[in-house]
Image (cartoon, rainbow, N blue to C red):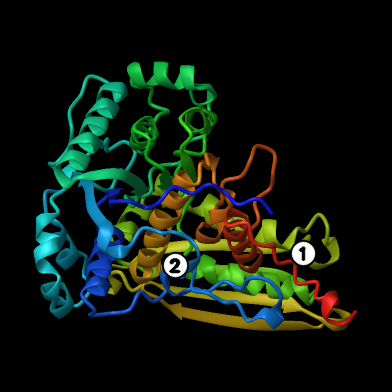
Amino acid sequence: MSKAEIREAKGKLGVLTPGIGAVSTTFMAGVEAVRRGIAEPIGSLAQMGTIRLGKRTENRVPALREFVPLAGLDDLVFGGWDIFEDNCYEAACKAGVLEKDLLGRVKPLLESIVPMPAVFDNRYVKKLSGPNVKKGANWYDLAEQVMEDIQAFQKANGVERSVMIWCASTEIFIQPADVHGSLRAFEEGLKRRDERISPSMVYAYAAIRSGLPFANGAPNLTVDIPALIELARERSVPIAGKDLKTGQTLMKTILAPGFKARLLGVSGWFSTNILGNRDGEVLDDPESFKTKEASKLSVLEEILQPHLYPTLYRDLYHKVRINYYPPRGDNKEGWDNIDIFGWLGYPMQIKVDFLCRDSILAAPIVLDLALFLDLSARAGRRGIQEWLSFYFKSPMTAPGLYPEHDLFIQLMKLKNTLRDMKGEELIHHLGSEYYD
């Protein structure tokens, strides 16, 4: 197999996050804790994963970080934007995810990270407002301000390469429209401040224009529009999204493939959540919840494929609820009641009560996306990076191609992509060669 030319990961890598809230501060504090030897990067495939090469009998199983040339954790530099003026340490304390003792040990770095004024419009996130907001004549003007921020950040920190990952709140539901259909129409919309263009799209546009790979960690319509896909291909920039796969949806992408593999029917799947962080407050708004609901509901249909298995899944009733409950903070609780049926149609039930920590699950995903998107850029890959579907609830794909949601197929795709980059044989698990 041909080996891809991958540029060396020289120098520092900037990681820029629109949103300095629970997810991004947990990510930044966590990376610093790992760098100081305080903790381990648990949950990070890039840091703790391995990859099999060749036949099972060869016993070649290197660490992923040794197999492909990823940026080192010591080379990561952090920055971002937020509507609140709190530095990263203050924001992390308010988020309440990490213990004060741990935060105190990484305080010098966190205090040095002060958010840049954000592109924000309360019409798109109705439950929030803050003072640290940019002013501009239109979206295009604001995008240019973000591009200036990127340049200033890179110059101040001696950074040549950067990536941007949206870690801010879920915006209201926006339907794709003609303004999203081409780069020309989109740029015209930016200049007239078209209301169908959201702040997250402004960031994505600014990132891609600046040559930064971009990933959308929320479910809102952002980089998954023809205009920005066109721009990413034109500028040879990798993009990925959307909606980080944590908590309840992670469980669905683990359980549903098992039911399908065993050809067990599913008649109903009722999911409800309580959470009390800023994400919960934002999702208390029906328009923002609609965005999240669309992302969470799509998973089961695309895994179970009722059009191919009508006897098992045609009548599946799937309901998702999210409830804002302030006392719970970032420690989300997700309940699932799953009604399944087996041989001769006999019914059974499964109950799942996942008391998870949303930002703890999300932080290593942010790290992996930063490292793998930077790798993609250095390997000359551009446009949609479907091989990173492993990390998302609503993976981006080529137009007309249904997304693959099965977590285990996604992991196989990710590792095979890395093998392909390095000119190694792809693993298909047939195994017949061992018995010939």
Q: Which of these two is toward me, 49 or 147?
A: 49
Please tell me how crowded label 1 is: few (under 14), some (14-19), or many (20+) other residues with Cα within 10 Å: many
Amino acid on which the number 1 mark rests in the picture: Tyr
**In this rendering, does residue 84 appear at all?**
yes
Left or right: where 84 falls relative to 251: left
Q: Residue 3, position in %: x, y?
A: 60, 52
Which residue sits at x=15%, y=72%? 103
Q: Identify the residue under disc 1.
A: 313
Q: Amino acid at mark 2?
A: Arg
User: Which-is-in-front pick, marks 2 and 1?
Assistant: 2
| Residue occupying image coordinates x 27% and y 79% | 39
Residue topped by disc 2: 65
The residue nearer to you, when weighing 103 against 67, is 67
Judge left or right: residue 154 versus residue 57: left
Q: Quadrant of the N terminus?
A: bottom right
| Residue 290, visible in the rendered structure | no
**Contact, CB < 8 Å: mark 2 with mark 1?**
no
